[in-house]
Image (spheres, coloured by chain):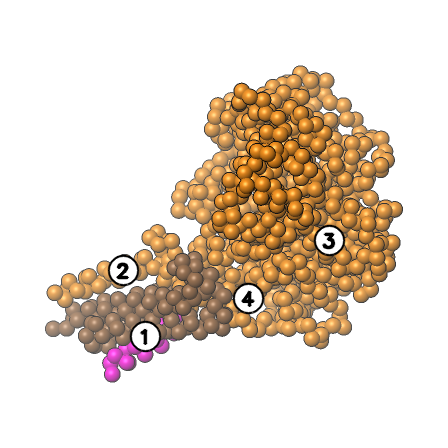
Amino acid sequence: MKFIVSAITSVLLSYAFGLFLPWWSIMIVGLLVGYFIPQKRIFSFLSVFLGVALFWGLFALFVSTSNEHILAKRVAMLVIKKDSPLLLVMFTGLIGGISSGISAVTGRSLALLFKP
Amino acid sequence: MKYFIFSLSLLINAAMFYVLGTREILPLPLGEFLSVQEGVWQNAESTDFDFTSDLNLKGINGKVDVYMDERLVPHIFAEDENDAYFVQGYLHAKFRLWQMEFQTFAAAGRVSEIVGDKAVQFDRNQRRIGMVFAAENALAAMEKDDSTKAALDAYTNGVNAYISSLNKSNLPVEYKLLGYIPEKWSNLKSALFTKQMTYTLAGFDKDLEYTNALKVLGEDNFKLLYPELADSLYPVIAKGTVYPKPLADLMPPSTADSLYFNRRDSVQITSDFKPNPSNGSNNWAANGTKTKSGKPILSNDPHLSLSLPSIWFEVQLHTKAFNSYGVSFPGLPGVVIGFNDSIAFGFTNAGRDVKDYYEIKFKDESKSSYWFDSAWKNADQRIEKIKVKGQKDVLDTVAYTVFGPVTYDKSFKNELTNEKAYALRWVAHDTSNILKMWLLLNRAKNYDDYHHAISYFNVPGQNMIFASHSGDIALWQQATFPLRWKGQGLFVMPGEDSSYMWKGYIPMEENPHSVNPLSGYVSSANQRPADSTYPYFVPGTYEVYRAITINKKLEGMFNITPDDMKALQNNNYNVFAELARPILSKYVKRDQLSADEIAYLQQVENWNLMNDPLETGVTCFVHWWDSLYNNIYFDDLHQTPNTLVKPEKFVLLEALTRDSAYKFIDDINTTEVENLYTQVTNALKKATVQLNQLKKEDKLEWAKFKNTTVYHLLKNNAMPFARTGIMNGGGNGIINATQHDHGPSWRMVIEMTQPIHAFAVYPGGQSGNPGSKYYDNFIDTWAKGEYYTLFYMHKEDVSSELIKWKMSFNPVL
């Protein structure tokens, strides 16, 4: 249950913070979710990773699909040297997921420091 | 333990934050760049994006409606023309902001700010040839004229209105890639754009190279290798035209022989930066005696580096005063090549040399005074501050003399022993308001209006073509061209006294022109403007062969329709090969050839002389002829460490046509004496090695070998944004002048009937966004030689089915 709450909260907060903050707002989201939702570190990581990776990945997939992958084809060649929009979509999810997931571990670890 | 885990995870966290947000570790800040809410995904424009919008903006006086057709061409309807320019600026920025800014950064020598120290030499060169100085002079003239200033102000405000609406997420892709943000537009940036165009079209010179060539080769050989006139010349103004005696004094200074012509000097400078000598164009207009409709048809296709985003942006401007349609330059208000209800206008480059160098003697290292007319004269010092991304600023002092900026001196380009200083005299530095010409052409109604409009234009020299609904056609080679005595400025000139300065400019009425000629047509293709009876000395870089095909075709055409003109613009006939092939056939020693060599020889001989996409004969011919050219000239041009400028391609062809014992045939580096037979045969053998390699790679077909490519402006740094492997024909010296990355950047055919029939295409798309389907959607149509029928809107068309979106601009007071 906490896992799901944690994942969903990270999606909602990431979207909201992203409206007015730069990309690293997803790291703040990770810190907050990790800090406030008590669960094993590994689950903090996985839940936030999953939430933000899905958010970024699906957002990118949706945008790219309505763009008929015109941009993603070109940018994929530029960034990952592969002619694969889907790979770029997954890579985007991965970057979002890892950076926020690590932050969740940091947040959780910080919370644990104050636990007797 | 928990402290350790926390520290470790904090460390990884911090590292990620840093790595994903900077360009120091990875080439891109991946977090920022891929962020779905602010990164590159925001530039993926939905393929059914709705461009309809309603905007309230400060800076316009009345309501402006913009009707967009399915190709994303805006048809701007404004009462007030300045409102139209405001909206044109807004739309240029909306669709082409990065390109507009990048081009003006390049003009101003500010590329290092964006890409770092690899551009410092480029930037210094731009500053030292006086690009900013030139733009400031142009701006002063433009702002002195009330109507030009009003147009520029409105345009600049429009660009800035769009820039103000930007935030991090909707910045163009290139800003996100390179990591910077746009600055405000200004009238100076528009002026800089005109100077970048001037550099592209009138920035080419060979003075320094010629100075060396004269020293190495001597006068006789120099004249043989770099002749003024081609035998096969078809001048812009037909042969036989009688020119009035010039009013101006054209005597060289009394010291010219000793101090100039017979001075043997070497210049240890090779300029790394030169505009592409292929920059050119075709234009022609036929009048009612030759057309089916009885009304003139005007055609124009400017040849430039093919780029994405395209140099052109298609637009219609409808105001109370005029209704013009055509292509515009993102960076300038108005239509640059196009038509209105009454007239059509277009341009090709004149190719005239309007740049000379003077050797300057400075008093001392400070470069603050120089010897001129028997006294030390003060030089102005302009300190150029070049900002370099991530590094310290570079400061560069440029001295300004009576001639202009001292481009080369000890501090710039003295890799060898040369420490001399050369000042640049360039028409581009003169004060003038060339924008006024375009603003007047947009509203011109007849020949007189056109003639008045073009009188404002000083540089880059253009062949300005005109046709009107009332039936007139005309062609003026127009600009302020320096008045030179014969031979002046071919070589570096003495800068120590005023007698070597230009004596003024050729009066406009004496510029070559042709109005309603009996032949029924006018045309130009970057060839020499006139034959040797034209009384002025007109050095330049001229093309010979396109003009021959165009004139021969037009002479024989009657009942011409727009379709005929489209076919002519796409004509692939190779007249150079027609003249050169007989020499290859005649002198090749067939008994000395291998099977491969015979096969290629046959391909050349059986070729239909068309540079069509699937032909292999043209590929074989080009390699064979190039090998012959190198066999004959390489030895002569490499006698010194400074490579000498290559003779034009007509020089070898005409020399061999006249005389098979041409003096340069023998290789001066071998003991035996080569003749034309051995050189032609040897050239085929050399070409065969290259051709066999191409055959192995399946690149013998012309289009595959040529690999027509429209590069992104960032060239090799952004290949995924380019279009490669476009299968089309054409080539250098062909009417369809499409080379590997250079060619017809806009093809236009306008029939001046009522209503006007207008057809055009360019190799790009209206949007500069690589994430838009309108980024390169015209390229396939262009490659096939097809055209779009232009939607020339009038007031009554506002509910036409051709309109897909409407943007409304409402004034906010």
Chain shown brown: that is A
The chain carrying label 1 is A
| Residue type highlighted by circle 3 | Leu
Q: Is residue A9 magenta?
A: yes
Which quadrant, please, contains the C terminus of chain A? bottom left
* View extreme (bottom): residue: A1
The chain carrying label 3 is B
The chain carrying label 4 is B
Q: From mark 1 to mark 2, how far is it between C-alphas? A: 21 Å
Numbered label attached to residue B14? 2
User: In this rendering, do the residues under marks 4 and 2 share a single chain?
Assistant: yes
Q: Secondary structure at mark 2?
A: helix
Secondary structure of the magenta portion, mostly?
helix
Which residue in the structure is indicated by mark 1? A51
Q: From mark 4 to mark 2, how far is it between C-alphas? A: 39 Å
Disc 1, disc 4: CB below 8 Å?
no
Q: From mark 3 to mark 2, how far is it between C-alphas? A: 64 Å
For marks 3 and 4 on the same chain, the one whose residue lies earlier in the sequence: 3
Image-quadrant location for residue A97: bottom left
Which residue in the structure is indicated by mark 4? B773
Which residue in the structure is indicated by mark 3? B568
